[in-house]
């Protein structure tokens, strides 16, 4: 992807790396281990991960903190961290392939970080809108579609929030 092919709007392209206080991220806990009761994601040493064996062996222990993880909270509250919009005539004839690519990117991200999830995929007036739990997954999806099919890719960062709109068309 060439630098000129991507438009960064609303200021400096690196501003999204500024640390933002995310109200969905857990604060300190006296428990060594926290487990999401919805998706079984586990939180230990400031990192979320999926480990079903650890979940099964730990869920009944009294020392475990049972919580709802940030991704499940965002899904429940319908509070996306990114929105990807796919459009154009090319999309109409390649919709199944492109959606496969999107879902594969979502599954790959989920394995690496259970907080990166696709919240929804909706068809709206000849376009496809994908909501994600965080901005990183939205960026990855846009980049994957662009890499596979070229076209036009645009990122729009919000001023105050940790949120991105990714638009791709061809």
Image: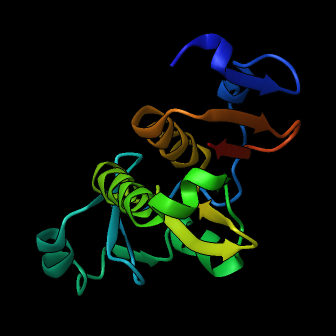
Residue at 37% over, 78% down: 39
29 or 159: nearer the eye? 159
The reply to whether residue 74 is visible in this rendering is yes
Residue at the spot 57% in from the left edge and 71% down from the top edge: 121
x and y, in percent, of residue 127 in the image: 68, 64
Above or below residue 25? Residue 55 is below
Observer-nearest residue: 81 or 49? Answer: 81
For this view, does 104 lie left or right of residue 137? left
Provide residue 44's location: percent of width, then percent of height.
33, 54
Furthest toward the bottom, the residue is 60
Whether residue 87 appears in this view of the structure is: no
User: Is residue 66 shown above or below 90?
Assistant: below
- In x, y percent, where is residue 27? 59, 55
Vertical placement of residue 141 versus 59, above or below: above
In-image side of 79 versus 119 (left or right): right
Which image quarter holds the C terminus?
Answer: top right
How far from the left and from the top, in percent, is residue 107?
A: 32, 60
Residue sitting at x 73%, y 46%: 165
* Colour option used: rainbow
- Residue at image location 41% in from the left, 67% down from the top: 96
């Amino acid at each position: 992807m060439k630098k000129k092919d991507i438009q960064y709007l609303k200021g400096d392209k690196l501003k999204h790396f500024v640390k933002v206080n995310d109200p969905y991220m857990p604060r300190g806990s006296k428990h060594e281990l926290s487990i999401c009761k919805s998706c079984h994601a586990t939180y230990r040493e400031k990192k979320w991960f999926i480990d079903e064996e650890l979940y099964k062996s730990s869920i009944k222990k009294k020392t475990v903190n049972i919580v709802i993880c940030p991704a499940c909270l965002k899904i429940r509250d319908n509070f996306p961290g990114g929105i990807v919009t796919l459009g154009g005539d090319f999309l109409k004839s390649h919709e199944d392939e492109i959606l496969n690519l999107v879902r594969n990117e979502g599954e790959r991200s989920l394995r690496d970080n259970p907080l990166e999830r696709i919240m929804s995929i909706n068809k709206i007036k000849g376009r496809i809108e994908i909501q994600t739990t965080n901005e990183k997954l939205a960026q990855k999806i846009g980049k994957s579609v662009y890499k596979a099919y070229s076209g036009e890719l645009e990122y729009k960062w919000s001023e105050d929030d940790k949120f991105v709109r990714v638009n791709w068309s061809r």
